[in-house]
Image: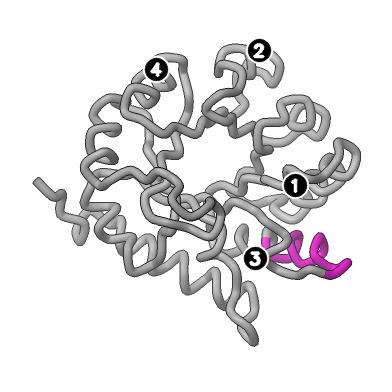
Amino acid sequence: MICLVTDRRRLSTGLDSVDLLVELVGAAARAGIDLVQVRERDLEGRALAALVSRCLAAVDRSATKVLVNDRVDIAAATGAHGVHLRADSVNVTAARLLLGKHAMVGRSIHTVDEAASAAADGADYLIFGALYQTMSKDAGHPTVTLDDVRAAGRAATGVPILAIGGITATRASEVARAGAAGIAGIGMFVPPPGVSADRHLQGLAAQLRRSFDTREAVPLH
């Protein structure tokens, strides 16, 4: 499972950043990225709802699901596929009551105990990290280990664990061997200068899926 977490400021500091983000989401759908988490926490409600609606249109007729970071109200208002909850947010049951039983509800976790609790609460997937140091967190932000990823997977039996935090395509294989079901990230999905979003995401998605292919990802013991 591959989850693109958005941050339009990584794409541009100009007025076209929203347009570039929508283009990236469309490219993610064409590349077969599973989840897009719209995480634009500085946007007020109306602007965020407009962006989510554009992202939903960009993934139309694809298998890609658009989730709203923590704003259950925006997810409900826009008809998003679901919501991704912070570790300290409302419980999964409450979110699902507002969104409907078919909505996808994920949660961020930072400890093995949180993995067990969120799984018991009915989360569809869990994002666990940060695994490595990352631009998205302050220097010195606590990190988890590959052993923690493995333990979280055991604690959350049957619920996919996605590792996040400093993940790169080259690190994906060791994440897979630790038992994660996939990865989530921001920076790795941003196209390098001069490379189109489609070309970058097509190549990245293919490389990530090879890393998580059970024929290549032999579990670490």
Comparing 98 with 186, the one in front is: 186
Q: CA distance from mark 3 to mark 4?
A: 35 Å
Image point 72% across, 59% down: which residue?
Answer: 8
**Disc assigned to residue 204:** none
Residue at the spot x=33%, y=60% of the render?
Answer: 172
Q: Which portion, as a residue range, is magenta? A: 14-24
What residue is shown with label 4?
117
Q: Is residue 150 magenta?
A: no
Asked whether disc 3 touches disc 2, contact meaning CB atoms under 8 Å apart, the reply is: no
Q: Earlier in the sequence, mark 1 or mark 2?
A: 1
Which kind of residue does numbered mark 2 sit on? Answer: Leu
Report the residue marked by disc 2: 97
Dot 1 corresponds to which residue? 56
The Cα atoms of the two marked residues, 2 and 4, are separated by 18 Å
Q: Which residue is mark 3?
A: 27
Callout 1 crowding tier (Cα within 10 Å): few <14, some 14–19, many ≥20:
many
Q: Residues within 10 Å of mark 3 (few under 14, many from 20)?
A: many
**Pointer 1 with pointer 2, Cβ within 8 A:** no
Q: SS at mark 4?
A: helix
Helix, strand or loop for disc 2: helix
| Magenta span dominant secondary structure | helix
Q: Report the Cα–Cα distance between label 4 and label 1.
A: 30 Å
What residue lies at 29% left-to-right and 40% top-to-bottom?
149
How far across and down, in percent of the image, does residue 11 sit? 70, 68
